[in-house]
Each structure stands twice: as C-alpha cells, then as structure tokens.
Image (cartoon, rainbow, N blue to C red):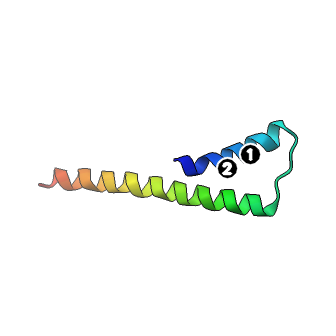
C-alpha cells in the first residue's frame, strides 16, 4: 500500500505545483506502484482462495 504513495505524490505535485516529472522519476514511481499493486492483488487473492477452501471442508 505504501509503495503506491510516491506515484500519487508525483502526480499531485505535477497537477497542483506546475511541476514536470522526468523519465527516471516516472519509471521509479511506476515500478514501485507496480510492485505495491501486485502485492495487494496477491494478498487479496490468497485470502479469497483460503475462504473458498474453507467452504469445501
């Protein structure tokens, strides 16, 4: 979850502070957001899978 914050901060500062991002910052924040997003998907998927297995016990 915390890995998504740099992307939001970068986007908001660009929108409201009239700042332009560079490619290094975009790749870095995008990579962090990708890892954070997929981590959330994995955690939620494991929880759903465990709940389904409990139904069949």
* Image position of 9 (left or right of 54): right
Q: Nearer the viewer, residue 54 or 33?
A: 33
**Residue found at the very far left of the displayed protein:** 57
* Image position of 44 (left or right of 49): right
Residue 34, x across and y down, in percent: 58, 59
Q: Residues within 10 Å of mark 2 (few under 14, many from 20)?
A: some
Separation of residues labelled 2 and 1 (CA atoms) = 6 Å
Q: Secondary structure at mark 1?
A: helix
Residue at left 88%, top 41%? Answer: 18
Residue at left 82%, top 58%? Answer: 22
Say if 36 sits above or below 15 in the image.
Answer: below
Q: Secondary structure at mark 2?
A: helix
Say if 52 sits above or below 9 in the image.
Answer: below
Residue at left 81%, top 40%? Answer: 15
Q: Residues within 10 Å of mark 1 (few under 14, many from 20)?
A: some
Numbered badge on residue 38: none
Residue 14, x across and y down, in percent: 81, 44
Screen quadrant of the C terminus? bottom left
Residue 24, x across and y down, in percent: 77, 63
Q: Nearer the viewer, residue 53 or 19?
A: 19
Number of residue marks: 2
Q: Which residue position is annotated with label 2?
A: 7
Task: Say if mark 2 contacts mark 1, CB within 8 Å.
Answer: yes
Say if 49 sits above or below 5 in the image.
Answer: below
* Image position of 53 (left or right of 17): left
Residue 52, x across and y down, in percent: 24, 53
Q: Which residue position is annotated with label 1?
A: 11
* Image position of 8 (left or right of 24): left
Residue at left 71%, top 63%? Answer: 27
């Amino acid at each position: 979850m915390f890995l998504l914050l740099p992307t939001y901060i970068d986007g908001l500062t660009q929108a409201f502070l009239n700042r332009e991002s560079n490619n290094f910052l975009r790749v870095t924040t995008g990579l962090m957001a990708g890892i954070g997003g997929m981590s959330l998907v994995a955690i939620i998927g494991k929880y759903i899978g465990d709940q389904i297995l409990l139904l069949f016990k």
